[in-house]
Image (cartoon, grey):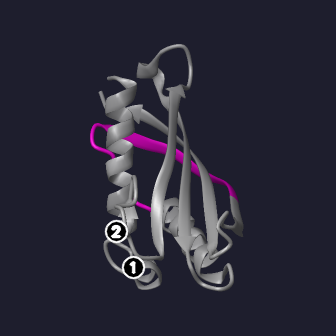
Amino acid sequence: MSLQSAQGALRKGLFACLAGDATLAGILGGGRLFDQAPRGQSFPYLLLQLVDSKPLLALAEEGLEHGLRLSVFSRNPNRDQAAEAAGRAADVLIHGPVPIDGHRLVNLTIGAVVSRAMRDGRGFQAECILRAVTEPLT
């Protein structure tokens, strides 16, 4: 098992779990979950901005710890939409299931949900910071 294969399986599982939630789709609109937003993408949308994976113990085969950061971008005049979507995404992932091919999700916890004005001053960004622990099924 490599870090890259575990990370790829986790990303795929996160997106599958989020895409299956009708409430989140109602907030964002369908199909607005990305690793990187396409040029000209309309708001709001969610990005998986960070996946930082490292061995939990000495060897990757003993389990991996993943730092995750989901960000929601909104042009609403207040932070409510971005914060609601980020909070819903966190809730959906915590209650799962998050399918991870070849791996088992041992633990998933929320570190923080933070919102702030975007640099251009024309909207808001909300981030959900998560920590996941996975182990290979073999």
Provide residue 40's location: percent of width, then percent of height: 37, 69
Identify the residue shown where x is 56% and y is 19%: 57
> As drawn, is 33 to the left or to the right of 132?
left
Under mark 1, the amino acid is Ala
Mark 1 lies on a secondary structure that is helix
Identify the residue shown where x is 62% and y is 75%: 123
Where on the picture, by quarter, is residue 37?
Answer: bottom left
Q: Quadrant of the C terminus?
A: top left
In the figure, 102 relative to 39: above or below?
above
- Asked if residue 138 lies in the magenta stretch, the reply is no
Report which residue position mark 2 lands on: 19
Q: CA distance from mark 1 to mark 2?
A: 7 Å
The stretch of residues the image draws in magenta is 96-112
Under mark 2, the amino acid is Ala
Pick the residue in front: 138 or 55: 55
Pick the residue in front: 38 or 48: 38
Provide residue 76's location: percent of width, then percent of height: 59, 84
Tag 1: Cα neighbours inside 10 Å, few (<14), some, or many (≥20)? some
Q: Is residue 19 visible?
A: yes
Report which residue position mark 1 lands on: 25
- Asked if residue 110 lies in the magenta stretch, the reply is yes
Q: Are marks 1 and 2 in contact (CB under 8 Å)?
A: yes
Tag 2: Cα neighbours inside 10 Å, few (<14), some, or many (≥20)? some
In the figure, 72 relative to 134: above or below?
below
